[in-house]
Amino acid sequence: GAGVSQSPSNKVTEKGKDVELRCDPISGHTALYWYRQSLGQGLEFLIYFQGNSAPDKSGLPSDRFSAERTGGSVSTLTIQRTQQEDSAVYLCASSFSVGSTYNSPLHFGNGTRLTVT
Amino acid sequence: AQSVTQLGSHVSVSEGALVLLRCNYSSSVPPYLFWYVQYPNQGLQLLLKYTTGATLVKGINGFEAEFKKSETSFHLTKPSAHMSDAAEYFCAVRHNYGQNFVFGPGTRLSVLP
């Protein structure tokens, strides 16, 4: 497939459990972003990767949230000890972002809907 | 800090009527500008983008947007609304010196029969 792939599409977990959300970006895209979208709300920036490093992780809500990216490709967002307020749709997006490609748009996956019960 | 404002969190139009969704950005340097659409239970899809050149940009599904530097605006329009246009619309900006995209809060478009 040519698009951004996220898995799982839906995740229901109990409060206090850890969850891992996966994002597979478009091949060749160097930048990868995670956003959170709560019900009826806009996009909340979480973290951005350039290659395997994260120059901007300012949006992570707490130290329960972490993310990594390996091989300049797949990224995993981990939420430890989930809370009910973590319930949201987690969106991943990728883009070219080197030099003259700053005008390249973000390409989004369909998101993972996380429900914490 | 950069910001993007979208006037009207919810806009309702009748089918066949003009659609106008507003977007303003705060920046002394014109950024790259984007409009995205989000249909229910889906991710965001690019409608159109402005980078350089012609200030009137045509996108998919009959939408277009005009970049007005003097007004720091990038409003989205469509001459005739269709029921299938009902969705959430997000305006976003990005600068050529930064990596991040800044999104507006979104405008929900309802199309009435």
Image: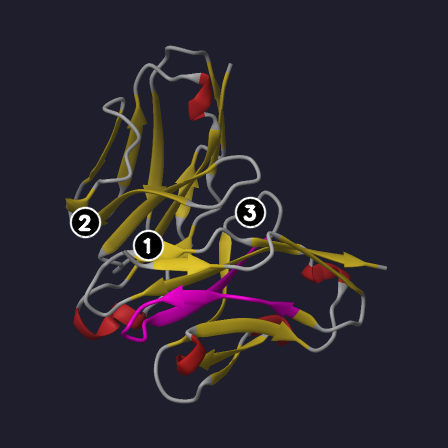
A67 versus B41 height, above or below: above
Q: Tell me if I can see residue B87 in this picture.
A: yes
| Residue A72: image tag | 2
Task: Write down the chain letter for disc 1.
Answer: A
Q: Residues within 10 Å of mark 2 (few under 14, many from 20)?
A: some
Estimate the x, y position of residue A60 in percent, counting from the top left: 28, 34
Residue B21 is one of the magenta-drawn residues:
yes
Q: Label 2 to label 3, Cα distance in Å?
A: 25 Å
Name which residue lies at 23% across and 40% down: A58
Q: Label 1 to label 3, Cα distance in Å?
A: 16 Å
Residue B95 is one of the magenta-drawn residues:
no
Name which residue lies at 55% across and 66% down: B22
B77 versus B89 height, above or below: below
Q: Secondary structure at mark 1?
A: strand
| Residue B42: image tag | 3
Q: Residue furthest bottom?
A: B54
Estimate the x, y position of residue A24 in percent, counting from the top left: 33, 45
Amino acid type, label 1: Ser
Task: Specify the quadrant of the image occupied by residue B17.
Answer: bottom right
